[in-house]
Amino acid sequence: MSPRLVHWELFVSEPILTLTDVVVAFDALRAVDGVSLIVPRGQRRAIIGPNGAGKTTLFNAIAGAHPPTSGKIRFNGHDVSRLPSHRRAQLGISRTFQITNLFPTLSVQDNMMLALRGLKPKKFSLFGSPDADEGEAARIVDALKAARIAERADTIVKEMSYGEQRQLEIAIALVTTPTMLLLDEPAAGLSPSERSMIAEVIRSLDPAITVILIEHDMDLALGLVDYVTCMFEGRVLVEEPPEGIRRNAKVQEVYLGKPRHA
Amino acid sequence: MTQPVSKTSVLAGMTSRALVIAALVVIVAACLPMVLSSYQVGLATEVLIFGVLAMSIDILAGFAGRTSLGHGAIFGVSTYVVVYATGQAGLSPWAGFALGVLAATAVASVFALLAVRTSGVYFPLLTLALGMIVWGVCLRWTQVTGGENGMRADVRPAALMSHSAFYWAVLAGAVVVSFAMWRFVRSPFGLTLRGIRDSESRMRSLGYNVPLHLFIGFTVSGIFAGIAGGLYAMFNNFVSPSTVALAQSVEGVLMMIAGGVGTLFGAFVGAAAIIVLENIVSSYTERWLMVLGITFVLIMIFAPEGIIGKLRAITSRKVR
């Protein structure tokens, strides 16, 4: 076996994301309390749990918006524990926000342009033309099509419906061609038909992208992923494939409460 | 590509119609010295200079969402350096002008380093404080700045001695600088400033180094403020601490607001409105500051988007 091949195998087997004993504390409150997690390359993972379980805080720790108080985060062979958000984005971590976080006074096209140029030197072009070049235009159209809002490119974001804004969130996350996509409650606050639209968008994502999904709605989440992590009070409660999660007594307990006379 | 019908695209796409309007405005402006008295030509020159200052503030306020109260100081540093370099150091006016812009850029970059990590109300307050430091230095460093008496020097080149000739020179400068600023705000970099205005956290997660972008934006804005300050040195042949005072910064901001925040060229309209008002009203009453104040209150109530912003809203309503 050539040394080259050995190296290749190591590369394949290394998980894309490894969390070791991650703690995020706000003064006395340990919102994330010693979470360890291994996500293999290309996996679809859901993180579920009741309100206040620390799901979004964990996302913020992974994406860099609020770095961990202690513990280690390795992404794609780099220790990113202390890196700021924009450096992690450069390494291929892309995220959407639970509360829609777009550029409301700009057009969809400009939103996409900002998303696309975040990692390119062209963002420093001080007197250049504002228009997208051919390659950029094609990538923007592809991402908008994947999120099914291609016909809205010229609309100002604040004039779009909430559902469309959620779709734009995903389009923005996609256009950067991330290695790992963090989706924070992508379907929150949407109507049933909008939810199935979002589910369809997530299902048709490129299988090479690792997707981690926070979702409140168990039915939606379990239909989309290979593996589920259930969090409760800042810790990992259960890790199982979707089929097992549905029947898991602990999960039912944190979601439905403990039966009084058990 | 089709241009969307939106506020940003009116700014971003120089259509043939915009080009015609711009050309007409410049031609009319160029003809002004033929109909105005030399005193009025002086006022018009002042309008152009302060219009450039107000535009430089608008780059940050209207596009990056950061209102600087320190730009008067950056402007004034350039004025001081130009007057000192030509008067005391004996350099040519052009060399002095270049040094002035350079000094203003350097001061702006120092301001920027300190201010870019702040937002909300802290940004104007911090830039205000930094401007006050510059004012204090100019007031106290008497051997160099002349203290409260200021400095006099024949800065204006001989060729531009007449009111009209100087006006045309400033007009040419203002056109070039305005075009540069217009290109700047609609460039890929200018779009990043608008992105920062709308959502800093989103920009960070997309991979932008927000403070770095604000630093560059602030420094570039400082270059333009410095150009305005250099022109002002040639206009006045005199500089005193009131040139770098807070009132100067505030006046620039008020001109920008009166014209319309984020409209860029509104700065000239705002500068014209305020300078003309100041000069007309002050010839009738000593209470001209009160009249100015009332005018501002009225603008805030009836046209918070500024004069140009209001006109734009009215015309787009008619089109629809």
Image (tube, coloured by chain):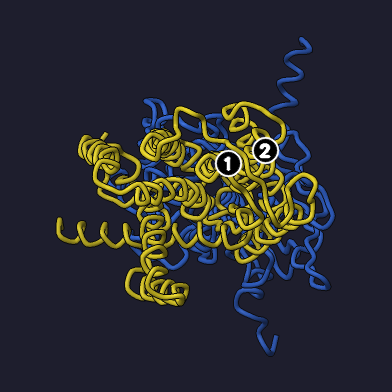
Chain colours: A blue, B yellow
For disc 2, the chain is B
Q: What residue is rendered at 41% in x and 77% in y? A: B294
Residue B103, horizontal then vertical, whole percent: 67, 38
Please tell me whether residue A206 is drawn above or below residue B309 in the rendered image. Answer: above
Is the C terminus of chain A in the top left, top right, bottom left or bottom right quadrant? bottom right
Is the N terminus of chain A in the top left, top right, bottom left or bottom right quadrant? top right
Find the residue positioned furthest to the bottom.
A261
Name the residue tied to disc 1.
Answer: B226
Residue B289, horizontal then vertical, whole percent: 47, 73
Q: Which numbered disc flags the more N-terminal residue, 2 or 1?
A: 2
Name the residue tied to disc 2.
Answer: B103
Relative to A10, A42 lies left or right: left
For disc 1, the chain is B
Residue A204, horizontal then vertical, whole percent: 42, 42
Q: Amino acid at mark 1?
A: Gly
The alpha-carbon separation of the residues under discs 2 and 1 comes to 8 Å
Q: Is residue A44 visible?
A: no
Q: Nearer the viewer, residue A34 or A130?
A: A130
Relative to B66, A18 lies left or right: right
Q: Nearer the viewer, residue A97 or A218?
A: A97
Q: Are marks 2 and 1 on the same chain?
A: yes
Q: Quadrant of residue A119?
A: top right
Relative to B216, B195 lies left or right: left
Q: Amino acid at mark 2?
A: Ala
Q: What residue is rendered at 79% in x and 55% in y? A: B140
Please tell me whether residue A246 is drawn above or below residue A43 in the rendered image. Answer: below
Find the residue positioned furthest to the top.
A2
Is the residue under label 1 in contact with that under label 2 (CB below 8 Å)?
yes
Residue B254, horizontal then vertical, whole percent: 47, 62
Q: Circle 2: is it few (<14), some (14-19), or many (20+) Cα within 10 Å?
A: many
Q: Secondary structure at mark 1?
A: helix
